Image (spheres, grey):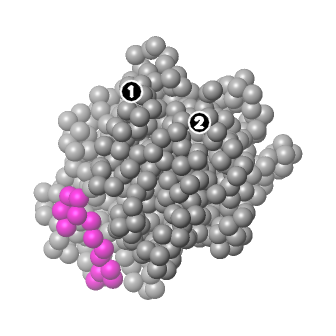
Amino acid sequence: MSGPLVVLVGPMGVGKSTVGELLAARLGTTYRDTDADVVAEAGKPIAEIFYDEGEEHFRALERRAVEAAVAGHAGVLSLGGGAVLDAATRELLAGRPVVYLSMDVDEAVRRVGLGAARPLLAVNPRRQWRELMDARRHLYEEVARTVVATDEHTPEEVAQAIIDALELPEGPAAPGVENTGMTQQSPTRIQVAGSAGSAGSAPYEVLVGHQLLGELPQLIGDRARRVAVLHPEALAETGEAVRQDLADQGYEAIAVQLPNAEEAKTVEVAAYCWKALGQTGFTRTDVIVGIGGGATTDVAGFVAATWLRGVRWIAIPTTVLGMVDAAVGGKTGINTAEGKNLVGAFHPPAGVLCDLAALDSLPVNDYVSGMAEIIKAGFIADPVILDLVEADPEGARTPAGPHTAELIERSIRVKAEVVSSDLKESGLREILNYGHTLAHAIEKNERYKWRHGAAVSIGMVFAAELGRLAGRLDDATADRHRSVLESVGLPLAYRGDQWPKLLENMKVDKKSRGDLLRFIVLDGIGKPTVLEGPDPAVLLAAYGEVSA
Ligand SMILES: NC(=O)c1ccc[n+]([C@@H]2O[C@H](COP(=O)([O-])OP(=O)(O)OC[C@H]3O[C@@H](n4cnc5c(N)ncnc54)[C@H](O)[C@@H]3O)[C@@H](O)[C@H]2O)c1
Ligand SMILES: [Zn+2]
C-alpha cells in the first residue's frame, strides 16, 4: 500500500508535530499535518471553524484532508486530536502504519496548559482531559498499529521509539522520496510562521537552492486540479515552461502573462486575472503560482487572497528583492492612483521557491537594488552579512559571486524570524522598515520610477546619520553604512532642495502614527530601536548629510 510511512494520532499537545517533523528529518522525508491542511483550506484557524461552523463541519473538512493525505502523502503524517472520532476517518486508517502517541493526565495538563488556542480545553483542563480521553482512548487504540508513550520522554526518544516499533528505514533515500541520483545539493529550508489573527494560516517553508521546480507538485498538492501560473512579460518563456511542466503532470494549467514591474500592480490587472480564473473554473482547492519579481508575487498573492476569499498560492521569486523580501512575510497588494500598496491582504503563500539560477538573467541594477535589503538585514540583525559583502563587494553585485546563496539565505532568515515572532504581536516587524521612512518619501517624489533598493540605500544612510546625531550610534557604524552600500554601487545621496517635499511625504506615510514621525535607528549593529518625533533641526541636519 502506498501512502504515509507513519501516521501519528493522539491527543492534542502530545507532541505530534514536534515528533513528526523530527521523524520526517530522520527518515529523509516530508511532514504533513491535516490540521494545517484544514486551516489552509478553510482560510481560518481551527478554533474559528469550531466557533463559526461547528464541530461537525470541522470533522467533515478533516475527513477530506485525511483522505487526500493518506492517498497522496508518502512521508510522515499527523492527524488532529479528534480525527479518530469520525468513523469514516477511522476507516481510511485501516491497515496504515498508525502510531498512537499517548500521555497521562498530569503530563497533558502540563503540556496543554490552560486552553491557549485549543478549542476543546478552554475550562477545567484536568476534568475535561479525563472525559476526552475516556471517550477517545479506545478509538486511538483501535486505529493504531502500535502505542508509544511520550510521558517523560524527549521528542528524539519518541521518534526513535517509533522508528524501532515500525522498523522504519532511516536516511535520505527512504522509500517514497525521489532520489534523482544526481549530486545536486539539497535546498536550504527556512521555516516561516503563518499569519495570526482572524485569517490565520499555516506555517510555510522558503526553499533556497537550484533546480527547485521539482518541488512544485508537492507544494501544489493533489487536491488541486487547476493551476494558474502568473508571470511577467519578461519571463514569458519561463512561465510557459512551468505551465507545460504542470500540464504534463496532469494539472489543468494556464499561464497568465502580466505586465512587467509596477504596471502589474493595478486593479485592472487583478481583474484580468480574476477573469482568467473564472473562465478556467478555478475552485477553492486550486492553486496560483506567482513567478517573477516582487511586483508579480505581490499581485499573484493578492489575486490568491481575493479569489473565492482566498486560495492557496506558491511564490517563485526571481529577483533578489523578491527572494529576500517581497515573497516572504505574507503581505500582498496592489497600488492605486493615491499611492503604492494601499490595497492588499495578509495572505502567506503555501511555500516559496527561491531558485538561484533565476537570478542569472536579472539586469545588474535590479540585482544591486536587492542588495540594499540584504545589507539592511545585516545592519538590523546579522553582521555576518556585512562581513561577507565587505569581503568581496564586486562578487556581491552578481549572482556568480562567492557568497550569493549565503547572503540570500541569511537575509531570508532575518525576515522570517522577524515576521514569525511578530505573530506574537511583538511589534518587531517595524524594524524591517529600517531606512524605509525616507525611502518611501523619495520613491513617491520620483513617482515610483526609482528602484526600491536605491531609495532604501539613501534612507539607511539617513537613518544612520539620525542615529549618530541622536547620540545613539557610534561614528564607525554610521560610516560603515556608506562604505558597504557604496561598495556594491548603491547611491548615498539625494537632491538637497527636495527636503520640504520629502518631509511632507513622510508625514502622510501610512506608517507614521498621528503627527509624530517614526524612524527605526540603531543603537549599534543588530540593535534597532524606534526614534519617535525627532527634533526637526536634527532631521534637517541628518538630511544635510545625505544631500547632494
Ligand atoms: N510584499 C512585500 O512584503 C514586499 C516587500 C518588498 C517589496 N515589495 C514589492 O516588490 C516590488 C519590487 O520588486 P522587484 O524589485 O523584484 O521588482 P519587479 O518585480 O518590478 O521586477 C523588476 C523587473 O525585472 C523583471 N524580472 C523579474 N525577474 C527577472 C529575471 N529573473 N530576469 C529578468 N528579468 C526579471 C520584471 O519583470 C520587472 O520588469 C514592488 O512593487 C514592492 O512594492 C513587496
Ligand atoms: Zn524594502
Q: How many marks?
A: 2
Disc 2 CB within 8 Å of nearest ligand 1 atom: no
Q: Residue at x 49, y 80 (%)?
A: 123
Q: CA distance from mark 1 to mark 2?
A: 19 Å
Query: Nearer the N terminus, badge 1 or badge 2?
Result: 2
Q: Residues within 10 Å of mark 2 (few under 14, many from 20)?
A: some
Left or right: where 132 falls relative to 343:
left
* Mark 1 vs mark 2: in front: 2
Q: Residue at x 30, y 50 (%)?
A: 153
> Which residue carries the number 1 mark?
170
Query: Does the magenta stretch mainly form a helix, a strand or a loop?
Result: loop
| Percent x, y of residue 452 | 46, 53
> In the figure, 116 relative to 3: above or below?
below
Observer-nearest of 299 and 426: 426
Q: Amino acid at mark 1?
A: Glu
Q: Amino acid at mark 2?
A: Arg
Q: Quadrant of the C terminus?
A: bottom left
> In the figure, 314 relative to 85: above or below?
above
> Which residue carries the number 2 mark?
96
Q: Is residue 290 visible?
A: no
**Residue stretch in magenta:** 523-535
